[in-house]
Image (cartoon, grey):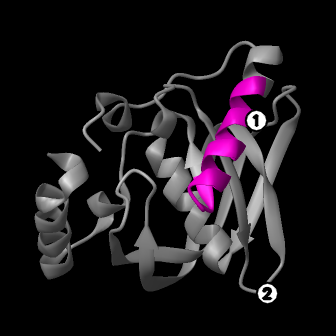
Amino acid sequence: MGDPVLRVECDKVTTFDADLKRLIDDMFASMYAADGAGLAANQIGVSLQVFVYDCADDAGRRHVGHVVNPTLVAADGELLDDDEGCLSLPGLRFATPRHAHAVVEGVDMTGKPLRIEGTGYFARCLQHESGHLKGQLYVDTLKGATRKEALRAVRSATWSS
């Protein structure tokens, strides 16, 4: 949580090589080891615009992949409050408002253009990971009493001291 790389916008990837592939492989391994549904590069200390994901949409279809230099081009539809957690804030979950539909555009590890569209939990994941690459944590989207509760929990967490 306290790592400054989580609070700044990540750099665009400009080199598409074996190091980028290795980073993406490492990110998947880290995400799976932590039982996560998504992981942004800055969560493992690398300030590059890359995230990986493995999660289902609202129809139960599993989506597994990565995106480099993503841009969240749409976040629309119904605004849903659902419990959300983060590998950077282990053990904490709070009702977080996210749109039911999201679209991310970017490229894959070879530079090939991607357009990723998601609904339900997958849309939540796309919005969450895109936020990380802009230096945001999900608790930044919270409002009112939920935000106060989340910030108190972050301050008192044993891993944040």
Residue 67 drawn above or below residue 74: above
Where is residue 25 shown, x and y percent of the image? 76, 35
- Residue 58 appears in which quarter of the rendering? bottom right
For the N terminus, give its image quadrant: top left
For the C terminus, give its image quadrant: top left
In this rendering, which labeled residue sits more in front, label 1 or label 2?
Answer: 1
| Identity, as a three-letter code, of the amino acid under mark 1 | Asp
Residue 39 drawn above or below residue 112: below
Residue 109 drawn above or below residue 73: above
Where is residue 68 shown, x and y percent of the image? 70, 34
The secondary structure type at the circle numbered 2 is loop
Residue 99 drawn above or below residue 2: below
Q: Residue placed at 88% from the left, 32% from the top?
A: 112
Q: Most prominent secondary structure in the magenta stretch?
A: helix
Question: Which mark is drawn over residue 25?
Answer: 1
| Identity, as a three-letter code, of the amino acid under mark 2 | Ala
For residue 140, side relative to residue 106 (left or right):
left
Q: Residue placed at 36% from the left, 53% from the top?
A: 137
Would residue 98 be counted in the magenta stretch? Answer: no
Question: Which mark is drawn over residue 59?
Answer: 2
Where is residue 28 shown, x and y percent of the image? 71, 45
- Residue 138 appears in which quarter of the rendering? bottom left
Cα separation, mark 1 vs mark 2, equals 27 Å
Where is residue 55 shown, x and y percent of the image? 71, 68
Q: Earlier in the sequence, mark 1 or mark 2?
A: 1
The secondary structure type at the circle numbered 1 is helix
Give the magenta-colored segment's residue range.
22-38
Would residue 31 be counted in the magenta stretch? Answer: yes
